[in-house]
Image (spheres, rainbow, N blue to C red):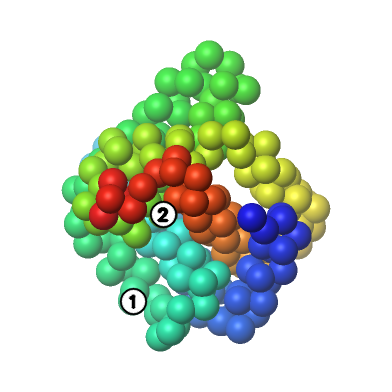
Amino acid sequence: MKTRQEIKALAKQSFSENYWVCVGATVLAFVVIGAASGVTSFVGGLGGLIVWAPMMVGLQFFSLWIYRGELPAPTIEDMFKTGFSDFGRKLGGMLWMELFIFLWSLLFVVPGIIKAIAYSFTPYILAEYPNVPATEAVKISMRITQGHKGEIFMMSLSFLGWFLLNGLTFGILGIFYVNPYFYVAIAGQYQDLKELALQNGVVTLDELA
């Protein structure tokens, strides 16, 4: 199992080697989500939700692809294909994830944060394993993250300084560095913890396949 520092070092290297496509993919994903969410009508609001789910699946799997260094290197088109193919299952999985997080958040902030971490690998599972049903993706994410929520939280917390600097630059640093680097690092942590879960029998290849 890699340390947080090792994962971030690999993420930074992979991100640097694919700098402009990573920046372009992250920016485009949030532009599309923002445009869909910015419509003020009810239909527009619903449209924003429907677009957000597959775009986040596509972006996070794109980031995983970058972290792995697989060839051929992913393109922005791959991000859209991954997100919007098998649309209903991916939308359903993401909506279940958000619903569960919302319900746990009603019990105060801390339970909501804990469950958000537990469910955070759902998008990767939805994208990587097309035969896993929507609700099962949420459950498998819970099993992979069991006992590792502190590590996942610390990974996000380790970017706090970068996020503060991003605020000082009015988001410019986030566009050109922080956001794509962060997504690749989180994808790397998913990859590492998934491999550990497979080694320990927490999940099996049969249930993923």
Residue 13's x, y, as percent?
67, 77
Residue 45 seen in render: no
Residue 83's x, y, as percent?
31, 60
Q: CA–CA distance between discs 1 and 2?
A: 17 Å
Q: Which residue is mark 1?
A: 77
Q: Residues within 10 Å of mark 2 (few under 14, many from 20)?
A: many
Furthest toward the top, the residue is: 107
Q: What type is the residue that disc 1 sits on?
A: Glu
Residue 207's x, y, as percent?
28, 46
Nearer to us of marks 1 and 2 is 2
- Is 110 situated above or below 52? above
The tag on residue 130 is none
Which quadrant: the C terminus? bottom left
55 vs 150, nearest the viewer: 150
Q: Residues within 10 Å of mark 1 (few under 14, many from 20)?
A: few
Which quadrant: the N terminus? bottom right
Q: Residue at x 43, y 84 (%)?
A: 71
Q: Residue at x 72, y 56 (%)?
A: 3
The tag on residue 124 is 2
- Is 30 situated above or below 206? below
